[in-house]
Amino acid sequence: MNFIDFMQLQEIDRVETITKEQFLANYFRPQRPVVIERIIEDWPAFTKWNFDYMVEVAGDKTVPLYDNRPVDYKDGFNEPHAKMKMRDYIELIKKEPTKFRIFLWNILKEVPELQKDYSYPDFGLKLLKGLPMLFFGGRDSYTFMHYDIDLANIFHFHFQGKKEIILFDQKQNDFLYKIPHSLITREDINFSNPDYNKWPALKKAKGYTTQLEHGNVLYMPEGYWHYMKYITPGFSMSLRAIARNPANLSKALYNIFVMRHYDNLMRKLKGQQWIEAKNEKAIRRTHKKLGIS
């Protein structure tokens, strides 16, 4: 077991290929992540999907862009920070670093032609065929540490470039400075290079890390926290299957139908004070549980 730096990060298992039976027995049932290196080489996307092809098929599409600014009470749930034509965005990330990312872009809805380039692998789970999502980023752009609202099983297919991944399961919540009534940790934590004097609880967090390259597929189990940083410009596609664990499914329903709406209501009632109070509470809760003053 190889642990890295202060956070106890174990390298994610890597396999070249895997059968459905192997995946279910070794990774899905024990809820462990894995990188599969060579499972999509028969997809047209494996050879076709690059920036130039995306400009060709989707260059005129207007895409939602997100950056790393702190959450503001005026922001709606998953509301984009900017918009741009796909061709202009790809030109930008090829030319220079930018914090702008494309997040949760539904290719089934936006560019149906791309559906011909991939299929749905048989991992023994029923993949949701209406929700293939694309994610793009320029060099050094990153997502805040977060987990998905539906706690789904996620298969993350990477194309072009290289991406750094850090994962934690839900058992690590006490160490991650989780924001109450939210799906994120403190946004000012740099998970690539944490300040352990400021965030001492992170030293106790046990997680996983890896890097993805073109054609790699990462399986993220139900409800896993994930931080993703683009080492070079690139993009990925995620396919998902609903949570099977009853507790996770219940939590997903709570997040969707209760937590999200409660948080939005409190933003309207209390404004930025609500955001700042949650940020402070994340520190107090975390340090109290660990006996840190």
Image (cartoon, rainbow, N blue to C red):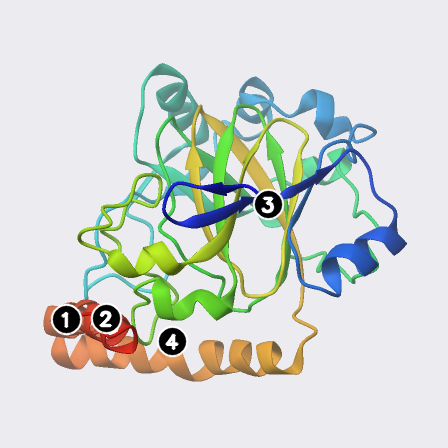
Q: Nearer the viewer, mark 1 or mark 4?
A: 1
Q: Which residue is mark 2?
A: 287
Residue that carries the numbered disc 4 in the rendered image? 260
Q: Which residue corresponds to mark 3?
A: 1
The answer to whether 205 appears left or right of 215 in the picture is: left
Callout 4, which amino acid?
Answer: Arg
**Disc on the earlier residue, 2 or 4:** 4
For disc 1, the marked residue is: 293
Disc 1 crowd, CA 10 A, few/some/many (<14, 14-19, 20+): few
Question: Label 1 is placed on what type of residue?
Answer: Ser
* Secondary structure under the numbered disc 4 in the rendered image: helix
Label 3–label 2 contact, CB within 8 A: no
**The residue tagged with tag 1: helix, strand or loop?**
loop
Looking at the picture, how far across and down is residue 287, in whole percent?
A: 23, 71
Describe residue 68's horizontal placement relative to residue 236 as left or right.
left
Labelled pair 3, 4 in contact (Cβ < 8 Å): no
Q: Is residue 175 above or below residue 188?
A: below
Please state which amino acid type lies under the numbered disc 3. Met
Which residue is located at x 59 percent, y 22 percent? Answer: 50
- In this rendering, the answer to whether 74 lies above or below 247 is above
Give the residue displayed 38% in from the left and 59% down from the top.
Answer: 204
Residue 186 seen by the camera? no
- Rendered residue at 20%/70% (across/down): 292
Q: Are marks 1 and 4 in contact (CB under 8 Å)?
A: no
Mark 2 touching mark 1, by CB under 8 A?
yes
Separation of residues labelled 3 and 2 (CA atoms): 28 Å
Which quarter of the figure is the N terminus placed in?
top right
- The reply to whether dot 2 and dot 4 touch (C-beta < 8 Å) is no
* Image quarter of the C terminus: bottom left
Q: Taking 6 as reference, is 279 left or right?
A: left
